[in-house]
Image (cartoon, rainbow, N blue to C red):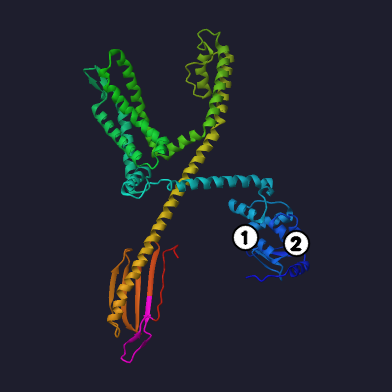
């Protein structure tokens, strides 16, 4: 408790010297009061005007009026830049200090962020925005598990188990096995779909007089679709939020990978009931849905971070992609028109119209150049050369932005992975602490059950004896009774695993003996030594 000092004593001590000692985190800075008065609206600027004990204690944490010293329990390194701001009028950012911590220091000292010099202000704001964005995304990921509410009954616990099995590959070994099986089915179905197009593997149907799919490969595809259907239905059944599940991009891909198979089979079954006029239309629809079966290869995106990164990069870069398409459209229209007017009068020219010249302009702008249509006149060749150069520039302009979006998404993926592992470690530590507390409780129960009967049954002579009891942590309890200085010693030893060691030693010393030589008091002295797992107190 700091004794209160009168205002007269404070003013008297201050008037003796124009200097003041500021102790910040153990580092002393001696400055002039006039230096602090340069910025009066800050914490240090208000310190000179405070003349009462209560007012000074609102500014600082402690003070010594005899030494004219004021103590602040704050970051000493950050304060070096702040006191320099009072002296020079320029505030700079230190690179070795966390941006958020430096912002807190500025707020404590009452200095606004816009006092930072232009060379540091943009860097400070950029770093702060990045940190806040990372903290927001990490918090969202950490809270994602909290949003998955299932319930405590057996039915909901089963749903939670299935959900973790199918949606979280790192949650258990079984989940990893399910992922491997799912990938194998995707690869197998894709290979079967590809092999079904080989002419020598297709089977001829005498009734329809047409080639049909190989029966063996068709069976393989049916089995794969059955697995995909079961997997999708189990995900739908176990999902905590059905509407969010239906809106999920990866779940939409899963549904698109399944539906074409059933629709094509349904149309094939209805061919016999259709008239000859409708037969051709149904057949075309069947072929379309058969082509759409190739979408099932996109199911790999669920298990491939690279494919997810590509998809989300395109999603984030829709503005840049739109800008690229606009540039390409303008360039194609411009150079196709120039090429048409340059080549239209030549005999045998392929530039018969501006729309016909679009194809040449597209393959030239993209620097593909198939060579099926080329300008032959000198002016046309000059237009073609300019088209190639402009195409390189037009395509190259938005690419860095798209690449930067890809890098940002990859960083987000790495951040989410670290957040997930950190969350798992927190849960693991909590579980270990819970098990450790239970184990220690069982150990003390063993002390009561073993030591007390021994003291009642044998009070005069202690013979060497060992008793071992098992406890849930796979430790063991040893009781040693020796006739050594009339002492009884008990110890619980738990083997050291995973940097975990627990040892309890209890020492019972005879306090005195009665006239018959029997123990008069036991347990008057208890020495204990407890080493808990690392990080526990």
Check disc 1: other Cα within 10 Å, few if <14, some if 14-19, many if 20+.
some
Q: What element carries label 2?
A: strand
User: On the image, which quarter does residue 385 sit in?
Assistant: top right
x and y, in percent, of residue 402 in the image: 52, 34
User: On the image, which quarter does residue 166 sit in?
Assistant: top left
Left or right of residue 209: residue 498? right
x and y, in percent, of residue 90 in the image: 71, 51
* Residue nearer the viewer, 312 or 109: 109
- Residue under the point 24% across and 27% down: 215
**Quadrant of the drawing holding the N terminus:** bottom right
Lower position in the chain sequence, tag 1 or tag 2: 2
Answer above or below: position of 499 versus 468.
Answer: above
- The span shown in magenta is 506-523
x and y, in percent, of residue 366 in the image: 51, 24
Check disc 2: other Cα within 10 Å, few if <14, some if 14-19, many if 20+.
few
Q: What element carries label 1?
A: loop
Q: Name the residue under label 1.
A: 74
Left or right of residue 134: residue 531? left
Q: Name the residue under label 2.
A: 32
Q: In this rendering, does residue 144 appear at all?
A: yes
Q: Does the magenta stretch include residue 516?
A: yes
**Quadrant of the drawing holding the C terminus:** bottom left
- Tell me the number on the disc at residue 49: none
Instruction: For marks 1 and 2, give the CA distance.
Output: 20 Å
Q: Does the magenta stretch include residue 101?
A: no
- Residue under the point 62% across and 47% down: 124
């Amino acid at each position: 408790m700091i004794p209160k000092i009168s205002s007269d004593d404070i003013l008297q001590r201050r008037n003796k010297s124009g200097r003041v000692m500021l102790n910040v985190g153990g580092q002393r800075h001696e400055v002039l009061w006039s230096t602090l008065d340069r910025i009066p609206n800050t914490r240090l600027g208000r310190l000179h005007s405070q003349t009462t004990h209560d007012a000074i204690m609102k500014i600082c944490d402690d003070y010594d009026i005899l030494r004219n010293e004021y103590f602040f329990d704050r970051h000493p390194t950050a304060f070096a830049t702040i006191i320099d701001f009072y002296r020079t009028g320029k505030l700079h950012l230190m690179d070795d200090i966390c941006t958020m911590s430096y912002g807190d220091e500025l707020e404590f000292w009452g200095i606004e962020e816009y006092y930072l010099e232009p060379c540091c202000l943009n860097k400070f704001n950029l770093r702060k925005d990045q940190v806040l964005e990372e903290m927001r995304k990490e918090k969202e990921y950490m809270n994602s598990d909290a949003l998955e509410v299932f319930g405590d009954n057996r039915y909901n616990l089963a749903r939670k188990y299935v959900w973790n099995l199918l949606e979280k590959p790192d949650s258990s070994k079984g989940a990893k096995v399910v992922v491997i099986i799912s990938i194998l089915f995707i690869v197998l179905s894709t290979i079967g779909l590809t092999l079904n197009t080989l002419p020598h593997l297709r089977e001829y149907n005498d009734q329809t007089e047409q080639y049909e799919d190989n029966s063996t490969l068709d069976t393989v595809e049916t089995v794969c679709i059955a697995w995909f259907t079961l997997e999708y239905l189990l995900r739908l059944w176990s999902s905590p939020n059905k509407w969010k599940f239906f809106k999920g991009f990866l779940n939409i891909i899963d549904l698109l990978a399944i539906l074409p198979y059933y629709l094509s089979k349904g149309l094939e079954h209805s061919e016999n009931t259709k008239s000859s006029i409708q037969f051709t239309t149904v057949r075309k629809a069947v072929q379309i849905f058969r082509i759409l079966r190739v979408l099932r290869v996109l199911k790999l995106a669920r298990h491939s971070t690279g494919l997810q990164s590509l998809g989300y990069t395109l999603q984030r870069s829709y503005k840049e992609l739109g800008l690229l398409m606009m540039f390409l459209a303008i360039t194609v229209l411009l150079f196709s028109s120039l090429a048409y007017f340059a080549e239209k009068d030549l005999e045998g020219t392929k530039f018969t119209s501006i729309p016909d010249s679009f194809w040449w302009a597209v393959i030239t702008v993209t620097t593909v150049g198939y060579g099926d249509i080329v300008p032959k006149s000198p002016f046309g060749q000059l237009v073609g050369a300019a088209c190639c150069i402009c195409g390189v520039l037009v395509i190259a302009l938005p690419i860095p932005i798209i690449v930067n979006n890809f890098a940002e998404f990859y960083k987000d993926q790495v951040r989410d992975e670290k957040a997930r592992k950190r969350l798992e470690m927190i849960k693991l530590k909590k579980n270990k602490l819970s098990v450790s507390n239970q184990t220690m409780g069982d150990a003390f129960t063993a002390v009561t059950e073993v030591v007390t009967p021994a003291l009642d049954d044998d009070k005069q002579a202690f013979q060497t004896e060992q008793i071992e009891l098992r406890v849930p942590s796979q430790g063991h309890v040893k009781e040693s009774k020796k006739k050594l200085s009339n002492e009884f010693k008990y110890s619980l030893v738990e083997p050291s695993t995973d940097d975990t060691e627990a040892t309890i030693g209890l020492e019972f010393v005879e306090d005195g003996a009665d006239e018959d030589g029997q123990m008069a008091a036991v347990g008057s002295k208890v020495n204990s030594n407890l080493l808990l797992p690392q990080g526990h107190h």
